[in-house]
Image: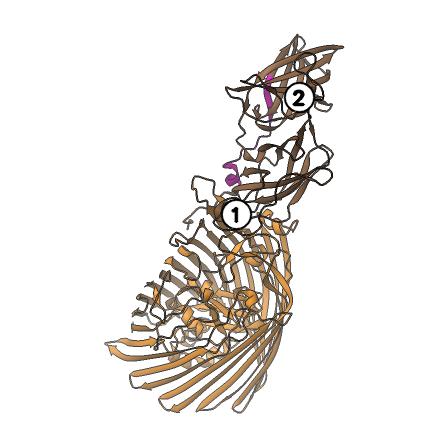
Chain colours: A brown, B orange
Amino acid sequence: MSCTKEKTDYEAEINTVVTEHYEFKEAAAISSEGYTISIEALNGTFYKGYNEIRLKITDTRTNENIHASSVTFLPVMSGADGSNTSCPHLYDLTYNTDDKYFTGYVVFTSESNTNRSWELYTSFVVNNKNYPAKQNITVQEQPNKNLNMTAFTGKDGEQYIIALVSPQKPTVAENELIAGIYKFNQPASPPSGSFPDPSQFSYTAVSNYTLQLDPRMPEPSMGNHSSINNKDLTQQSDGLYYGVVNYTMTGNWTLNFIMLNQNGKILKGTEVPTDFAPGVEGVKSDLYIDILF
Amino acid sequence: MKKLYTIFWTLFLGMNANAQNTQAQKDTAKVLEEVKVIAIAKKKIQTEMKMAVSVDEFLASSDNISFIKRGAYAWEPLLNNMSTERSTVTIDGMHVFGACTDKMDPITSYVESNNLSAIDIKSGQEGSLHGATVAGSIDLKRKSTPFSPEKKYNGAYQTGFEFNNKQFFNLGNLSYASDKFVADGSISFRKAGNYYDGNNNEVNHSQYNKFNTSVALAYKTSPFSAVRVDAIFDKAKNVGFPALPMDLWLSRAIITSASYKQLFQHGLIRAWDTKVYYNAVEHYMDDTHRPENLVHMDMPGWSTTYGLVSRANLKRGDYSAEIQLNAYHNLSIAEMRMYPQDRSKRTMFAYSWPWVTTRFTSVAMNNSWDISENSRVNFGGSLGYNYNRSKYVEFNWIFHPGTPQEKSRILPGLHASYQLTINQFNFSAGGGYGHRAPSVSEGYGYYIYNSFDRYDYIGNPDLKNEISYEANASAGFKNERMGIEAKVNYFYIQNYIIGRILSLGSPMNYQSVGVKGYTSLDHARLFNMALNANYNILQHLHWKGTLTYARATDDKGGNLPFIRPLSYQTSLHFMYKKIGIQTSLNGDLTQINYSPEYGEDQTPAYMIWNISANYSFNIKNCKTVLQVGAENLLNEYYSTYADWGNIPRMGRNIFTSLKFSF
């Protein structure tokens, strides 16, 4: 006797709105005086939000992968109004000796469109010679809401960006939640040297902050449903912030945050009501990120 | 040779006692005594008041059964005031598990009165033959026609109408028996609309439709052996549950088995019966007829079980025994899919039973030794092994991080009793000890909404075994004119499993007010008492009365929920020639010991008066009985202590029924 209704294929269920990418592919290639710089990102695409990048430099004559030094990376967005801004990124890339590539990250704060375009500025040194290079790139919308980001100004007047790094594909379970928290470093002096002056576009990962977490389902019928055993995000040695989020079912969730600085002072975020409120859209903290799986 | 046949079909009958053939049984009672080792009290499927009863109504007539009712259909039987997790409910020893997390489909809802011959109820550890238990066992005995030297057809057709809820039913069964071959078949339809309470208000969502059919074929492979295949198919559609926020759209069950029975003329082993079985249950709820629901939700459930039962009956001199091996494998799956108000948005999904496997094996033995003419010792025990696995254990980890995916338990059980008869008095005293494993919901349930206390329940895979220590006693007196019997039992249950409010977590179902987790109380105590009496006032006028009382407390002396208050039933039965008239009064006193902590409020006392009359006559060779009666004649408005959400019970119900049998 076959069943009247089919059972849900749980693995496929989570795949319906989330595609997980594992593979780094070339997202941009820049040529500079006999060298090719290949920048790889997951799925070969730069997305709005957090992107881990891998950079390889090849000598075009020998086709050899070379170990340059002082590799820098700087994304700059040009607006139609002539403004130039950047986004959180690692300026001095680090070399991964095992896999022979330079590694870093970039958190694009907006997608490319007709009013704004992104340019990557890189440079490296081979045999004491500096090779600058630049390339226009396209930043696409991140279809996976689990890699969402938010940008805001804290109570200290600083500009902050929080970007989700992991999990790409959450499950109804306890999930390790990883986020990056970055701050724009206001330039101390006016621009100097040739464009772009990195001191004008400097971001750093903040140290020893705490991101308090209260995940809730915003859907009115879920009545402000939450989960238990969640852990606030704290910084680990790689500079990223690690916490735990429990999702009790698939669907829309809001990660409500309160961000505290190293002295425990609230810089952004509000407590959300904890009472069960069926039929009412969940109240969100003024610092939150929506996810969906 | 004829005697051998007699032995054979008596045996066939013996284990599936067809109490309607009382004459046949009398003739072969002696033989029966020899092979039927331990006396089992069995009742035929009809109550004194009503001949066309549902399985639930029939069970309700037993004094240690009470019911949790969520509507007019699929009542959950409570044995010794304990819910179905604590008892084993089987069909001819076969384990079947409902597919509904809200217990809308107890096993008793998948059979029909015309495919059962009897229901065998055993209290406490005496019921451990079919599997580990605390409260006891309820075994639904399938109808089984014995082999017959002459070819014989038997059949019955019953139809009726009940006015309150416009229930119309048709029940038919037919059997053929010959020397080598027996076939049994049954079919039934029931359709009922909403019922009306004692204030003549319609109780919305109390309708039901049920179709049930069964077939069994037996073939005699030798004078002392036979094979039998058996199947039941049951389908309920559009069943309302007024006490729940949803109804049943469809449930279907197919229950199949094949068995081989061998009899032995000599030696210690007298009979050996081995059966393999398979059953599958699917259950789909429907909340689309409830406009008050904010959220639409699909809650499908599936339960598939296969297993083996093998039983040997032993007898030597004054000693007799039954040994039974049980083994089954069950997979229980239940899903929740909630639809957002904006249907274009993503649905929300979770498992309420995350693919939970249960494997159980037990060996059990019941022994009986007649020490003297008037005394007997019964003793026995069982040893069970219970294994659970949760496929999607990450659901369980949310509330119980790191709990193992698999869990094994050893479930021992022991019991002994002594029976003594002195002249017209009889006495018995006994005790028992046994473990049970948590049920699938108690161990692995995930946000199972309980509309009684309005909490979402979370299972705990690490619960300890529930351990029961019980004592029971009875005393009775019987003569030609009258009988009186008092029975008491007492359970001290360690690690008593019950839902406790969790201070953390928030509900998922929008009707609920909080989250409860299954936890173990240090202990709980249950006491049950029943007093039965009968008196033959005149040759044709009989009186019967029953009084039951129960009391149950948790480890802090607080009341446990769903414990029946003092209740009574008294009935008069008058028979004269072809006419029978019955009348009964039954009711509960005010529920004094209710439990607000577990969502109960006080239920007031009520009393119901029923009356019925029947007339028997023959049309050719066809025995015909016509019955007319009324339940709740005074149209009392009431609900009982175990009515989910205090939904009112049925008001006055006039019922008619006509039965032909040949």
**Left or right side of B6 for A253:** right
Mark 2 crowdedness (10 Å alpha carbons): few <14, some 14-19, many ≥20: many
In the image as oriented, which residue stretches furthest toward the left? B620
Q: Is residue B436 a member of the stretch shown in magenta? A: no
The N terminus of chain B sits in image quarter: bottom left
The C terminus of chain B sits in image quarter: bottom left
Distance, label 1 to label 2, CA atoms, is: 45 Å
Provide the residue designation for mark 2.
Answer: A201
Which residues lie in the magenta part?
A11-28
Residue B533 at x, y = what percent? 47, 86
- Please name the amino acid that badge 2 sits on: Phe
**Left or right side of B523 for B23:** left
Chain letter belonging to callout 1: B
- Please name the amino acid that badge 1 sits on: Ala
Mark 1 crowdedness (10 Å alpha carbons): few <14, some 14-19, many ≥20: many
As displayed, is residue A241 above or below residue B541?
above
**Which residue is rendered at x = 59% and y = 70% of the image?**
B365
Provide the residue designation for mark 1.
Answer: B350
**Which residue is rendered at x = 31% and y = 80% of the image?**
B613
